[in-house]
């Protein structure tokens, strides 16, 4: 099972891979130098670390993901809810809402997600929260 935690700099590096995969490792070094101001050894150290964690793989100098971005962040969310709320999604949502009032749009989105889950049909929702989900 992959480790679903990424530090901020690891997330930036993972985004470089997800945004450009499949990517040649030499090109990844160039992108990391430009975007993160990293030298080659730093890039390869981080790549080895994330490969060892089961997120990416590097074969024949080509880097690809073992977990797509959406799957990774879904797993991160599940792990957070499991660790902090005993796996209870309602307890998690209650903590988010607290005394704050949901907008009508946010409430409608939650209702649509729950209905979609109950019927097994896909919901129209951004897996990272979308604009409305960030308040």
Image (tube, rainbow, N blue to C red):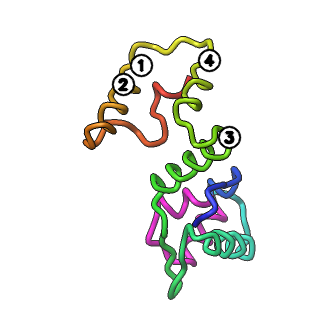
Query: Would you say the residues marked 2 and 1 are in contact, meaning their CB atoms lie under 8 Å apart?
Result: yes
Query: Would you say the residues marked 1 and 4 are in contact, meaning their CB atoms lie under 8 Å apart?
Result: no
Residue at screen point 42% across, 19% down: 107
Is disc 1 surrounded by few (<14), some (14 to 19) or many (20+) residues within 10 Å?
few
Q: Which quarter shows the N terminus?
A: bottom right
* Distance (Cα) linking label 1 and label 4: 14 Å
Q: Main secondary structure of the magenta part?
A: helix
Residue at screen point 69% across, 50% down: 8
**Looking at the image, residue 11 lies above or below residue 45:** above
* Distance (Cα) linking label 3 and label 4: 16 Å
Taking the magenta stretch, the answer to whether it contains residue 43 is no
In the image, which residues are magenta?
A: 13-34
Mark before the other along the chain sequence, 2 or 3: 3
Mark before the other along the chain sequence, 3 or 1: 3
* Distance (Cα) linking label 2 and label 1: 6 Å
Q: Position of residue 34 (x, y in %)?
A: 64, 61
Say which element carries label 1: helix
Q: Position of residue 31 (x, y in %)?
A: 58, 64
Q: Which mark is residue 84?
A: 3
Is disc 2 surrounded by few (<14), some (14 to 19) or many (20+) residues within 10 Å?
few
Say which element carries label 4: loop
**Looking at the image, residue 98 lies above or below residue 57:** above
Q: Which mark is residue 111?
A: 2
């Amino acid at each position: 099972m992959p480790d679903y935690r990424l530090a901020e700099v690891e997330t930036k590096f993972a985004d470089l891979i997800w945004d450009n995969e499949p990517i040649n490792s030499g090109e990844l070094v160039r992108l990391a130098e430009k975007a993160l101001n990293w030298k080659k050894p730093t890039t390869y150290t981080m790549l080895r670390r994330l490969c060892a964690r089961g997120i990416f793989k590097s074969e024949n100098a080509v880097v690809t993901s073992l977990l797509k971005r959406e799957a990774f962040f879904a797993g991160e969310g599940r792990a957070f809810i499991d660790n902090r709320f005993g796996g209870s999604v309602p307890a998690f949502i209650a903590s988010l809402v607290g005394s704050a009032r949901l907008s009508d749009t946010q409430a409608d989105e939650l209702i649509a997600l729950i209905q979609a889950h109950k019927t097994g049909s896909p919901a129209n929702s951004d897996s990272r929260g979308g604009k409305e989900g960030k308040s």
